Image (cartoon, grey):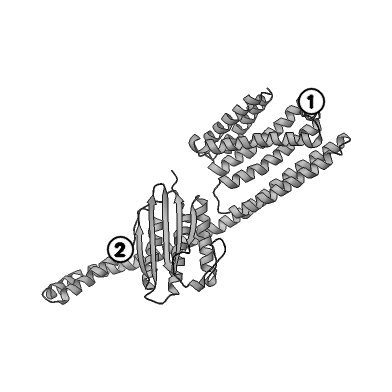
Amino acid sequence: MDNNFFELVSQSLSTIAVNFISMNFFKKKYGKKYQNNIIYISAFILWNIIMIGINSLHNPILNMIFMFLSSELFCVSLFKTNIKKSFVPNIFLVLIGIFCDATTFFIWSALLGKTTNDIYQNMQLMLISNLLYVLTFFIAYRIFLLITIKSDTKILRLKETVFLFIVTIVENFIVYNYTLKISQKTDGIVIIAFLILFLCFNIYITYLVKSVSDTYEYKYKIAMLTKQNTLQLENFRDLDYKYNQSIKIIHDMKKNLRVYEDLKDNQRADDYKQTLEDEISKLFREYQCSNTILSIIISQSLSQAEKENIIVDIQMEDLSLSFITDLDITAIFANLWDNAIEACKEMEEGKRHIDFIMRQVNGFVLINMENVYFVDKLVFNKNGRVVSSKENHMGVGLSIVESVVEKYNGFFHINQNVKDKFVVELTIPIEQ
C-alpha cells in the first residue's frame, strides 16, 4: 500500500477520533442546541471532510488556524453558547490537542531512536503513533473536562481521571516494549490491536464512571425533589389552614367589630384590637420574595423555628437566584435551615438563636447562616469540614451544600472563630 495513502488514512482516523472527543466536550459543557441528531451527524461529517482535506496540504500553520476557527464555528453553531463564553475553553482544547500530537510524536520518535521521517516511512509506526496520540488526547480531554465542567460528582470523576492517567502510562509502556520487538508485519498488527483494545478499555471505564455518576445525580435529584414536594405539601396544608382561618375571621368580622365597638372606651379594646391584628397577620406567608421555592423554604423554616421557640434574625435581599436550579436552591437553603434548627433544638429554650443573612455584593451572592450549638456535638477534620454530629445529619447536609456551591464555582467555609456559634459562609458568583 502506498505510504502517502496510508498516511492519509491513518491521520484521517485520528482526526475523526479527536473531533469526536471535541464534540463530546462541547455537548457536555454547553449542551445541544437542536434535538435532531441528523444535524449533528451531517455537520460532524462535513467538519471532518474539510479538516482531512486541509491536513492533506501538509501546512502546519494552515492546519492550526483551521482547527481554531472550525472548532469555534462548529461549537457556536450547534451548541448552547456564544463566542464570548466558548472562545477561551475551546482555544485551550485545541492547544491541548496540538500539544498532545506534537508531544506524543516526538517522544515516541526519541524512545525508538528514529527520526520523524523514519516514522512517516513506516506504516505501522505511523499508525501506532496516531493511536497513541488519540489515547493521550483522550486522557487530556478527561482532565480538562474535570477542570472546566460543573458537576456534583467531581470526586468520582477525579478518581476516574487519576485511574485513566495511570492506565495510559502503563499502556504506553507496554506498547513501547512491544514496539522494540517488531521484526515482522504481524508484530505491528498485534500492537495496533493492543492500542485499539486499550482505547476501547479507556472508553468503557469512562462509560462505567458516567453510569455511576448518572445514578448518583439521579438519587440526588430524587432526594431534592422529595424534599421540595414535602415542603410544597406542607405549604399547601398551611395555606389550606390559613384559608379556613380567613373564612372564620371573615364570618365573625361583624361580631368582632361589634365587640370592639362595645370595648372602645375600655382598656381591653387595645388588647382585643391587637389580637385581631395578630390573627390576620398569621394568614400571610412569613417570607415572600421573587423566587417561589426560596419563599416556601424560608417560610416553612421560620414556621418550624417558631414552633421550637427559636429566635430568628433574618436579613435578606430579594435576589431571584435565577442562575441556580430549583433543586440546587432546595439543596442549599433547606439543608442550611434544617441543620441550624436541629442544632438549636439541642439547646435549652432561651438560648436558641439563628442569624441568617443573604445579600449581593458586586457580582457575588453572600450567604451567612449562624446558629448556637453544643460544641461537643461536632467534630471537625483538619480541613475544617464537619465529619460527625448527631446521627451524622449535619455532616451529610453540609457536604451536600458544599458540593452544590462548588458546582457554581462558589466558596464554602465554616468559620470556627466565633465562640459558641456555628457559622457557615457561602460565596457564589452570579452568572451573567
Q: Reading the chain from its start, which is encountered first: label 2 or label 1?
A: 1
Point 76% across, 24% down: residue: 4
Point 38% across, 54% down: residue: 359
Asked if residue 325 is positioned above or below residue 356 in the image, the reply reads above
Query: Residue 259 occupies which quadrant of the picture?
Result: bottom left
- How many residues crowd mark 1 within 10 Å: few (<14), some (14–19), many (20+)? few
Query: Residue 309 occupies which quadrant of the picture?
Result: bottom left
Quick one: SS at disc 1?
helix
Where is the N terminus found, in terms of image quarters? Answer: top right
| Residue 373 appears left or right of 73 | left
Q: Which residue lies under the disc numbered 2?
A: 284
Asked if residue 245 is positioned above or below residue 97 in the image, the reply reads below
Which of 338 and 117 lies nearest the eye of the viewer? Answer: 117
- Callout 2, which amino acid? Phe
Point 45% across, 45% down: residue: 431
Q: Which residue lies under the disc numbered 1?
A: 3
Coordinates of residue 295 in the picture (x, y in percent): 37, 58
Quick one: SS at disc 2?
loop
Which of 429 and 309 lies nearest the eye of the viewer? Answer: 429
Disc 2 versus disc 1: distance between alpha carbons? 81 Å
| Residue 50 appears left or right of 191 | left
Outermost residue, left direction? Answer: 265
Coordinates of residue 282 in the picture (x, y in percent): 29, 67
Q: Nearer the viewer, mark 2 or mark 1?
A: 1
**Would you say the residues marked 2 and 1 are in contact, meaning their CB atoms lie under 8 Å apart?**
no
Which of 198 and 285 lies nearest the eye of the viewer? Answer: 198
Question: Does residue 291 show up?
Answer: no
Point 63% across, 45% down: residue: 143
Coordinates of residue 379 in the picture (x, y in percent): 54, 69
Outermost residue, right direction? Answer: 183
